Image (cartoon, helix red, strand yellow):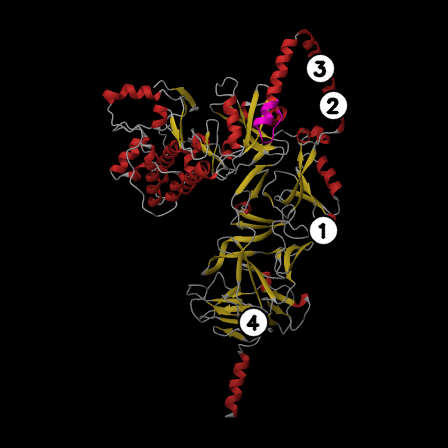
Amino acid sequence: MLFIWFCLFSYMTSTSTSLDSLAVSQSIRDGETLVSAGGITELGFFIPGNSARRYLGIWFRNVSPFTVVWVANRNTPLDNKSGVLKLNENGILVLLNATNSTIWSSSNISSKTENDPIARLLDSGNFVVKNGEQTNENGVLWQSFDHPCDISMPEMKIGWNLETGVERYVSSWTSDDDPAEGEYALKMDLRGYPQLIVFKGPDIKSRAGPFNGFSLVANPVPSHDTLPKFVFNEKEVYYEFELLDKSAFFLYKLSPSGTGQSLFWTSQLRTRQVASIGDQDQCETYAFCGANSLCNYDGNHPTCECLRGYVPKSPDQWNISIWVNGCVPMNKSNCENNDTDGFFKYTHMKLPDTSSSWFNATMNLDECHKSCLKNCSCTAYANLDVRDGGSGCLLWLNNLVDLRSFSEWGQDFYIRVSASELDHAGHGNVKRKIVGITVGVTIFGLIISCVCIFIIKNQGTARKIYNKHYQNRLLRKEDIDLPTFDLSVLANATENFSTRNKLGEGGFGPVYKGTLIDGKELAVKRLSKKSEQGLDEFKNEVALISKLQHRNLVKLLGCCIDGDEKMLIYEFMPNHSLDYFVFDETKRKFLDWPKRFNIINGIARGLLYLHQDSRLRIIHRDLKTSNVLLDANLHPKISDFGLARSFIGDQVEANTNRVAGTYGYIPPEYAARGHFSLKSDVFSYGVIVLEIVSGKKNREFSDPEHYNNLLGHAWRLWTEERVLELLDELLGEQCAPFEVIRCIQVGLLCVQQRPEDRPDMSSVVLMLNSDTSLPKPKVPGFYTEIDVTSDANSSSANQKLHSVNELSITILDAR
């Protein structure tokens, strides 16, 4: 009996499942494990996810959910429980299958093997083969930390051994069920100044950036008590991090989709938490904005802007938020005049791609500045290390790619700009300022002299000039309660109202894009001197819109009155107007159904504010697709309040003998009798809704079978229960039919012939965003069944009511 117990004890100790090490001639079979000394990590065989295959791996014990951090045979799985792990006399780990064939081994031995090698699993998750019980680094024959899988752990190096050429990198699993090496990898890129990059195959997906002494520039130091470390010498270059709180656990995982994730838990709370890091927004997509541009993320959407001294390479695409082509220098560099160049400072930046950079660890920032200035190819510079006030020099010698800004962290970055850009930014040299002042004083003196002579010779004309100036001063004081801009500032911002900066032209005059000295963009609406809708409409728009503040209304920033020049300055809308998109065969494909539905809702909310929620009760009177502007994220903003009217108290309607508006959007009662009300805007809104859904203009559409306009065509499809045929064919099956039908029904309710049948905007907003049943629409305005023979002439005559470029019109109604 004693003999039997002795044999059992010997067998159990030779295959113990509670030991942390594996000696020569010992083995681990499927179902047996090694457990680290502190009971934190475990090595054994496992099945990932829903797979049926088996793998040898390492995981953390007593953590939920199951967390595997390393897999030995990730590319050569076992089909059954026949796997056996052994350590041979040469210190090599071998994994054998049922036929005793080696399917994986740790054959990369870094030093001479002694007679008593041992493999030990550490609490850190590292599986180490050593020469006996040696504790120094020279005693390590092999370690799993040199062969990462999809997890980076504390004290695991990501980088290169420059002496042996061995690269350590993290690579994703193929899927959650398959640990085979996937298409994503986190590697240390040695081109230029080393930086961490996530690759998708050979292509760059995202970039963590270079280490700046404090952290990876793209990520602040994690909040889980970790200390980052970057080593760069003649022997090796690598990044690692250390855990300061030994009761906490923090890992970096590269998921099968290429998303970086942080995994963390504590020894007290052993439920693993997961959070995406680094690449959770589009600004972390490599070169999202193209070259020489800057990506900003407001928490919801990314936006791109060219760096100082650069302009979009493809302006048309840039204006519709296609930024991939980036920006190019505004002026070609002149290497003969490098001493006149300077640098513009950006703060809180993720530094651009350093693969085409040069660096020096001993230079200070001033020396770095001078070094970049001397090199014609140098486009920017920054400190290599931001600690203790900054040290070292990093120069960029090519395009600046993958820049982004942050609100609180990042570092200072200096880009090279021409002398003209420095002047534009208010950094001109003293000599130039002195010359400018001298010339200005001289010219001013001559002007004063001429004015004096002129006044003496013609006092009557001088009095008229004074009176006109006095009237303009009264206009400023009495009617305008918002900032005023100098004409010279606006002329400079628009390049003297250059045609290349012209955004479009409305009934009051052209609109120009302007860029102020500080880089802020704006839209300048310049009142045409030939316009008959002049001063009254100008004052009306200033008086009304200056009192309005809503997310779906264009914000008025200020105005300018200088002699005959009268201008309104608005926030700049990079995506132009709604008609620029929805009626264009190419551009309207960028308006998928969710975007169109958002625009329909946004316009409704803006109108509701005008009609009900603002301090004034306002009727727009010229609502149309060209007066709905789109911001960088394609959110709608109502603009152009020149024809708007405000109602007092409970007033809801009025009459005018001067009918103003745009053909195709004017309701019947307004066109025929000059009668306008809140329901006039509702009618215009209904037209816009049907145009957005169909992608067709009401005034240009003609039903080939019944010769109806868009409203009549929509009405016939509704009555014949074929209403989905109105949907823009480019949308295909990407939209929800229920939402489309509801929008069409709301549009038809808004364009009904009788104003009293139309809903108010509060009802419209409710109908668009609820599942309640809606009333059935009645016949729309202007609906008649016509045929070619009897009404073709009258129809064509009616079509002449509008102008070619869809300007707002003013007509006198003789009826």
Mark 3 secondary-structure assignment? helix
The disc, 3 or 1, on the residue closer to the chain's N-terminal end is: 1
Q: Name the spot of residue 468 as percent of width and height, x first.
A: 60, 17
The residue that disc 2 covers is 437
The disc, 4 or 1, on the residue closer to the chain's N-terminal end is: 4
Looking at the image, is mark 3 or mark 2 nearer the viewer?
Answer: 3
Q: Residue at x 53, y 88 (%)?
A: 6
> CA separation, marks 4 and 1?
47 Å
> CA separation, marks 2 and 1?
43 Å
The amino acid type, in three-letter code, at marker 1 is: Arg
Classify 652 as above or below 444. below
> CA separation, marks 2 and 4?
86 Å
Give whichever of 170, 800 is nearer the camera. Answer: 800
Give the magenta-colored segment's residue range.
Answer: 473-486
The amino acid type, in three-letter code, at marker 4 is: Leu
Instruction: Indicate the quadrant containing the C terminus: top left, top right, bottom left or bottom right.
Output: top left
The residue that disc 4 covers is 87
User: Which numbered circle lies on residue 387?
Assistant: 1
Mark 4 touching mark 3, by CB under 8 A?
Answer: no
Looking at the image, is mark 4 or mark 1 nearer the viewer?
Answer: 1
Give whichever of 813, 498 is nearer the camera. Answer: 813
Task: Give the left or right position of residue 475, taking residue 390 as reference.
Answer: left
The 10 Å Cα crowd at callout 1, few under 14, some 14 to 19, many 20 or more, is few
